[in-house]
Structure formats: C-alpha cells, structure tokens
Image (cartoon, rainbow, N blue to C red):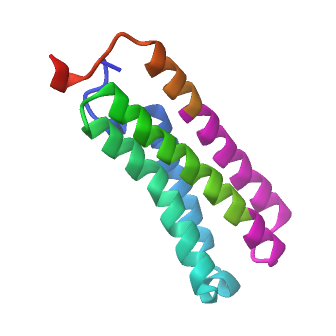
Amino acid sequence: MSTWKSFDEIEVWQLARVFCKKIYKIIQYDGLSKDYALKDQINRSSGSIMDNIAEGFGRDGKKEFIIFLSYAKASSEEAASQLYRIYDRDYISKDEFNKLLTDSKEITNKIGGLIAYLKKSNYKGIKFK
C-alpha cells in the first residue's frame, strides 16, 4: 500500500473504472434506457465501486480503507445482481451478461484480496505517522 501515491494506481480501481464504462454503454440500449429505476441503480452501483475505493484510500488509514473496500465489494455484488435483472428482462445478450458478470466477479475477488493483504500489512496509514 505504501507504494501507491494515488488511488488511480490501484489495479482494482482501474478494473472498476473499465467496468463502470461498460455499464454506461449498456444503459444506453433502447429498452434499458427506458427502465429508469434499473438503469439508474446499476449506474450508481457500478460507480460506487470505484468511488468507494478512492474514498477509502483518501482516508489515509488502513482501517478506514478496509471499511470502504468492503463497501466497494458490496457494490460489485449489487451490480452483479442487477446484471441478472437486466439479462432476465432481455436487455442484454447471454454473451454480454457473461462477460459483465465475469468482470464483476473479478473485481469482487480482487477487492477481497486487497482487504486480506491490508489486514496482514503493517501499514497503518499516513495520518498515523
């Protein structure tokens, strides 16, 4: 963790950013663009993944970072659930669904790995120096 100078250097944040871009593209599709609640919900949950990683990093403490990473992980799971609803309503193809679900699972797993790493790390955060 001490090697990162900014949240945008964190690999899982970068993956979350790409995922968010992919979600934004699919919410432009005809049917889904008119399903306002679901479109808004998945747009918010996918953005929340990257935002919580950044906010946690910005808290300058290991404990706070872990808490916000858990929020990001939960948002990734939420987006995965919303993908099932999008697929079940025939807004995306099986192939698109599978690719996006795989992306979401990868992000969830990498966040979990980062949490595990931080829990074992001696790093306490800038505000504790």
Vertical side of 19 occupied by 126: above or below: above
Q: For this rendering, which residue is in front, 68 or 31?
A: 68
Q: Is residue 103 magenta?
A: yes
The magenta stretch spans which residues? 84-111
Task: Report the residue at 32% width, 45% height from top.
Answer: 55
Q: For this rendering, which residue is in front, 34 or 126?
A: 126
Q: Is residue 35 magenta?
A: no
The single residue placed furthest to the top in the displayed view is: 122
Image label count:
0
Task: Report the residue at 26% width, 38% height from top.
Answer: 59
Task: Report the residue at 53% width, 76% height from top.
Answer: 40
39 to the left or right of 88: left
Image position, residue 114 (x, y; %): 50, 26
In the rendered image, which quarter contains the N terminus?
Answer: top left
41 to the left or right of 127: right
In the rendered image, which quarter contains the C terminus?
Answer: top left
Write down the quadrant of residue 33 in the picture.
bottom right
Image position, residue 28 (x, y; %): 58, 78
Write down the quadrant of residue 54 in the picture.
top left
Q: For this rendering, which residue is in front, 81 or 102?
A: 81
Q: For this rendering, which residue is in front, 129 or 106?
A: 129
Image position, residue 70 (x, y; %): 50, 40
